[in-house]
């Protein structure tokens, strides 16, 4: 081997293994739900990484150096917006990746076309708890809201890879058909329980409740993000009895003990529903998410 070839080989061995980038579009998402949406449209044209899993409280995510590197290498970043994933901003700033910064070619906030609920109209301060000034941000828990989210992602993918526009549009239309068919099934299952009253731990479910005809009559938290006090617990127990509430809904990342105590004393039951993909074992896709939650809720309400 001559000296020139030896030098080339030595240089090659010292170079980073990812110097030859994948031809796939690298996408980072705030949640596993958004990652699933990107996958069903982008399929084999994208590499998708979610920064969180469904069993984490999206309000309290601790940014890590590994997350910074994922954002730094991303071509596209997809976030929920409405301040729910405000923790992402520190990652974007630290990454110095202009493509995924606000206004960049790869920056996507999917909340823009959402019909938002519970938008504050007066003064907002810390005494009100964890109030979001742009409205309740748990909008993906209405499956109809998946449609504007998917449309926003589709437009950005087509902009990023215009040569694949036809491919992305085909995948998008096929998925919408699956989603529409699933929504018909979910609504039919929930029809017998229209007007049913429920209590939830955190105010995560107003979009879900509105879509499926449920009435939210109380929360285990006296204010969003505020732990329940003894007086609030007593008051809530009485309200559950008075309103004949059968079910208290919880997310998997909250501690069960308080809710179980309330349920025991009010003769209701606690059920754990998943707020996101991956929140409970076996929920691998957005369609899985609603299959699980609807079936679990129906099973609990009919007994």
Image (cartoon, rainbow, N blue to C red):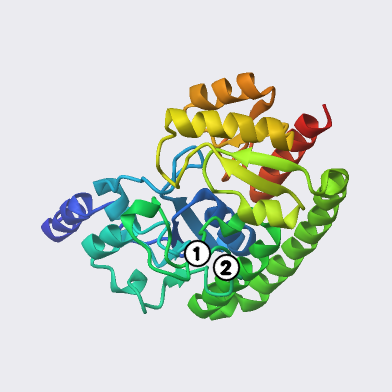
Counting labels gives 2
Compared across the picture, whether 275 is left or right of 22 comes to right
Mark 2 or mark 1: name the one nearer the start of the chain: 2
Task: Establish if 204 lies above or below 174.
Answer: above
- Examine the rendered structure and indicate whether residue 222 appears above or below residue 169: above
Secondary element at tag 1: loop
The image quarter in which residue 174 lies = bottom right
Q: Is residue 142 left or right of residue 80?
A: right
Res. 282 visible in picture:
no
Specify the quadrant of the image occupied by residue 193: top right
Residue 64 x %, y %: 27, 46
91 relative position to 116: left or right = left
Which residue is painted at 85% across and 55% down in the image?
A: 184
| Residue hosting label 2 | 116
Left/right placement of residue 11 relative to residue 224 reads: left
Residue appearing at x 60%, y 57% in the figure: 140
| Mark 2 touches mark 1? (CB < 8 Å) | yes
Which percent across, then down, holds residue 11? 17, 56
Near mark 1 (Cα within 10 A), the count class, few <14, some 14-19 or many ≥20, is some
The residue carrying mark 1 is: 135
Q: Quadrant of residue 283?
A: top right
């Amino acid at each position: 081997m001559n000296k020139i070839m030896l030098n080339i080989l030595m240089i090659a061995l010292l170079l980073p293994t990812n110097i030859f980038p994948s031809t796939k579009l690298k996408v980072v998402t705030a949640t596993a739900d958004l990652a699933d949406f990107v996958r069903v449209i982008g399929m084999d044209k994208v590499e998708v990484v979610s920064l969180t899993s469904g069993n984490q409280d999206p309000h309290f995510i601790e940014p890590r150096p590994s997350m910074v590197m994922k954002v730094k290498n991303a071509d596209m970043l997809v976030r929920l917006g409405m301040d729910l994933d405000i923790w992402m901003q520190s990652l974007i700033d630290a990454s110095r990746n202009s493509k995924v910064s606000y206004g960049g070619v790869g920056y996507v906030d999917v909340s823009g076309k959402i019909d938002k609920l519970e938008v504050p109209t007066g003064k907002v301060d810390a005494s009100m708890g964890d109030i979001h000034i742009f409205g309740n941000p748990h909008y993906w828990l209405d499956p109809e809201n998946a449609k504007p989210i998917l449309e926003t992602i589709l437009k950005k993918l087509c902009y990023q890879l215009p040569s694949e526009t036809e491919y992305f549009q085909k995948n998008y239309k096929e998925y919408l058909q699956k989603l529409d068919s699933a929504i018909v099934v979910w609504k039919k299952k929930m029809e017998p329980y229209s007007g049913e009253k429920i209590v939830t731990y955190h105010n995560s479910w107003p979009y879900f409740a509105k879509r499926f005809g449920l009435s939210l009559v109380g929360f285990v938290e006296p204010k969003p993000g505020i732990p329940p006090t003894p007086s609030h617990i007593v008051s809530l127990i009485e309200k559950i009895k008075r309103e004949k509430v059968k079910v208290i809904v919880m997310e998997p990342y909250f501690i069960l003990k308080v809710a179980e105590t309330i349920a025991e004393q009010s003769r209701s039951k606690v059920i754990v529903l998943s707020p996101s993909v991956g929140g409970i074992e076996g929920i691998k896709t957005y369609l899985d998410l609603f299959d699980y939650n609807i079936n679990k809720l129906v099973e609990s309400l009919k007994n």
